[in-house]
Image: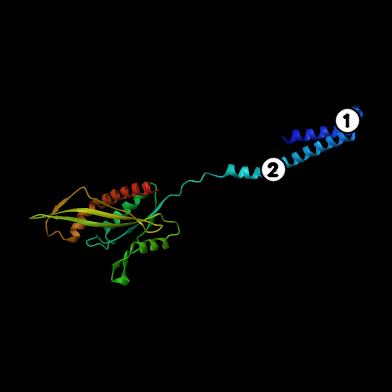
Amino acid sequence: MIAALLVACLVLAGAAVFGARVVPAAGSPAARITLVGLGVAFLLAAGTSAFLARVQAPAQLAATAQPAQSPRTQRVMVVGDDTPAGAIRRSDPVFEAALAAFETEFRRAGFATADGRTISTVDESLDGARRPDSEIVQLAHRTQREPLDAVVLFSLFVRLQFAIAAQTASNRGTATLLRASDAGNLGAFEAVSPSQWTLPYDCGRPCLVQTTGVEAPLVAETIAGQLVTALDNAR
């Protein structure tokens, strides 16, 4: 394009200079002015086109080289909550195994996980009362450099049913899903272990926790699957 304009300019300029020698009418002042004007116009057009090409080329190159932005991976923190009555303590190995399974299931589903083990749901200044959801979410943000999308409060229990000579025990887990931006409650979830154990009454609390805790990771995985579906639907 630019080369064609330059050639046209040269032709017009030559015609303006030498046209009078070849065609007498072309040597008139009006003809010369017209030819020179057209030559100048073509020169301006060629210069403008060249300038725009040089200005736009880097931007076009940068746009071509710009990689496609992929959606950011959602980041979830699971916080153990042992404040409900009858909940298994967070320090218990059974709870730790369930929490690890919880986080593994989230990562398997494509979510990033943040460690919420250092966050306590208990407010010691209020005689051990449970902290509000909003305060727990604020504490979660303070411990993380990366942005959080959701905070999960996870609790684990021994589920008991009593009979005449024995008690039936199973493992039960509950979870509350909180939106990390404003601590909004996105739902409550629950799962019970598929197995039930018939145990004598002399099987106390440690015995019950250890027996039913065999399936605690399975309960955690089931709840995590429910939460993954809820988070996918909330996108």
Single out the residue that lies furthest toward the left.
Answer: 164
How many angstroms separate mark 2 from mark 1 (CA)? 35 Å
Q: Is 189 rendered above or below residue 39?
A: below
Identify the image quadrant of residue 9: top right
Pick the front one: 96 or 78: 78
Amino acid at pointer 2: Leu
In this picture, residue 61 sits left or right of residue 208? right
Q: Position of residue 127 (x, y in %)?
A: 28, 71
| Residue 79: numbered disc | none
Q: Position of residue 175 (x, y in %)?
A: 29, 55
For marks 2 and 1, the one nearer the N-term is 1
Under circle 1, the secondary element is: helix
Quadrant assignment for the N terminus: top right
Q: Residue at x 84, y 37 (%)?
A: 36
Residue bearing mark 2 = 52
Q: Position of residue 198 (x, y in %)?
A: 13, 52
Pick the front one: 202 or 36: 36
In this picture, residue 46 sits left or right of residue 124? right
| Residue 26: numbered disc | 1
Give the crowd class for mark 1: few <14, some 14-19, many >=20 residues within 10 Å. Answer: some
Amino acid at pointer 1: Ala
Identify the image quadrant of residue 40: top right
Q: Position of residue 193 (x, y in %)?
A: 22, 50
The mark tally for this picture is: 2
Q: Residue at x 20, y 60 (%)?
A: 206
Under circle 2, the secondary element is: helix
Identify the image quadrant of residue 117: bottom left
Q: Residue at x 65, y 45 (%)?
A: 58
Q: Is 121 rendered above or below residue 171?
A: below
